[in-house]
């Protein structure tokens, strides 16, 4: 199927769910993104700063750019002027740097905090206790140029869909807990970024608001990233 057909199909599938599609276009050429754009897609996800910046310069200005991968602190400055949402904020130091660069650009940058929900210990992210402590801290209060609008998580890469479901459900529960227990002006728990090509259906059933889907839209990538 064509990219346009895939976009249409996804929009159909997402009707009646709380989720919207972030089209993950990493490694794909601008022509592929334009095909999706012409089918109405406006939210694109990239995981490399350099690639994201180059695509943002070349493509239509009403595209919403989502940084979805691991972000290094020294690269925040390149995307700070225009990025729409940073999904994978996995440390206090990174959030502080985003705050600093957002202030320089006189804007507020929306962020999602990444939570470690998978069994593998290679995945980045906060654990629950760490996250609660950080959100309750005065250090967090002082970050006036970021807004944490939700959580992001990646499930274990496994065929065991019950395990994947359990992990997504734990992320949803944690976001509810934060909503109930913590009130801060730079915190509004409304987004849950979870689900990719292999597990987006389960993620939707468990309350995802943003699925990050690449290969099911643009086809397999030539190299793994
Ligand atoms: C690449 C990537 C995706 C999309 O993966 P697919 O399996 O191609 O849908 C989602 N989230 C992150 C963080 C990624 O790096």
Image (cartoon, grey):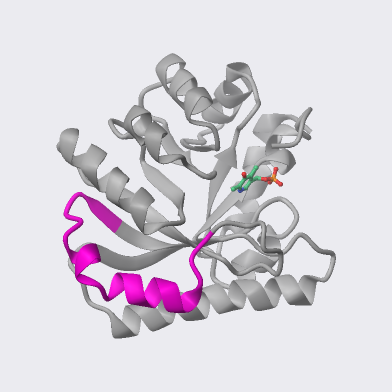
Counting every numbered tag in the picture gives 0
* Residue 100, position as x, y percentages in the image: 22, 43
Q: Quadrant of ligand 1?
A: top right
In the rendered view, tell whether residue 179 sits above or below residue 7.
Answer: below
Which portion, as a residue range, is magenta? 125-147
Where does the C terminus fall, quadrant-wise?
top right
Q: Position of residue 157 (x, y in %)?
A: 76, 59
Say which residue appears at 41% left-offset and 71% top-offset: 131
Q: Would you say residue 135 sits in the magenta stretch?
A: yes
Name which residue lies at 75% across and 55% down.
Answer: 198
Task: Report the residue at 59% width, 77% height from top.
Answer: 169
Q: Could you tell whether 126 is left or right of 133 in the image?
A: right
Q: Looking at this rendering, what residue extends furthest in the right direction?
A: 159
Q: Looking at this view, is 9 or 33 the one in front?
A: 33
Answer whether residue 25 is magenta in the image. no
Does residue 3 appear to the left or right of 19 in the view shown? right
Q: In this view, does 115 lie above or below 69?
A: below
Where is 4 relative to 175, above or below? Answer: above
**Residue extending furthest toward the top:** 58
Residue 202 image position (x, y, % from top left): 68, 68
Q: Is residue 217 left or right of residue 152?
A: right
> Which one is in front, 64 or 46?
46
Q: Tell me the quarter of the picture where residue 122 sits.
A: bottom right
Q: Nearer the viewer, residue 97 or 9?
A: 97
The quarter of the picture where the N terminus appears is top right
Give residue 216's position: percent from left, percent from top: 73, 43
Side of 159 relative to 168 (left or right): right
Residue at image location 20% in from the left, 56% down from the top: 143
């Amino acid at each position: 199927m064509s990219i346009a057909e895939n976009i249409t199909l996804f929009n159909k599938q997402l009707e009646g769910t709380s989720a919207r599609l972030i089209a993950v276009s990493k490694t794909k050429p601008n022509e592929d993104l334009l095909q999706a754009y012409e089918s109405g897609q406006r939210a694109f996800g990239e995981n490399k700063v350099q690639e994201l910046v180059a695509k943002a310069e070349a493509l239509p200005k009403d595209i919403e750019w989502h940084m979805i991968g691991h972000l290094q602190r020294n690269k925040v400055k390149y995307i700070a002027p225009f990025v729409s949402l940073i999904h994978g904020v996995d440390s206090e130091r990174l959030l502080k740097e985003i705050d600093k660069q957002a202030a320089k650009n006189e804007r507020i940058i929306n962020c999602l905090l990444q939570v470690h929900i998978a069994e593998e210990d290679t995945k980045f992210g906060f654990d629950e206790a760490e996250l609660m402590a950080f959100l309750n801290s005065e250090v967090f209060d002082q970050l006036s140029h970021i807004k944490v609008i939700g959580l992001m998580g990646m499930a274990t890469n496994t065929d065991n869909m019950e395990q994947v479901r359990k992990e997504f459900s734990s992320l949803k529960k944690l976001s509810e807990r934060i909503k109930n227990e913590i009130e801060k002006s730079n915190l509004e728990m409304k987004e849950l970024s979870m689900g990719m090509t292999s597990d987006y259906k389960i993620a939707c059933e468990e309350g995802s608001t943003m699925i990050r889907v690449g290969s099911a839209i643009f086809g397999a990538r030539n190299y793994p990233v």
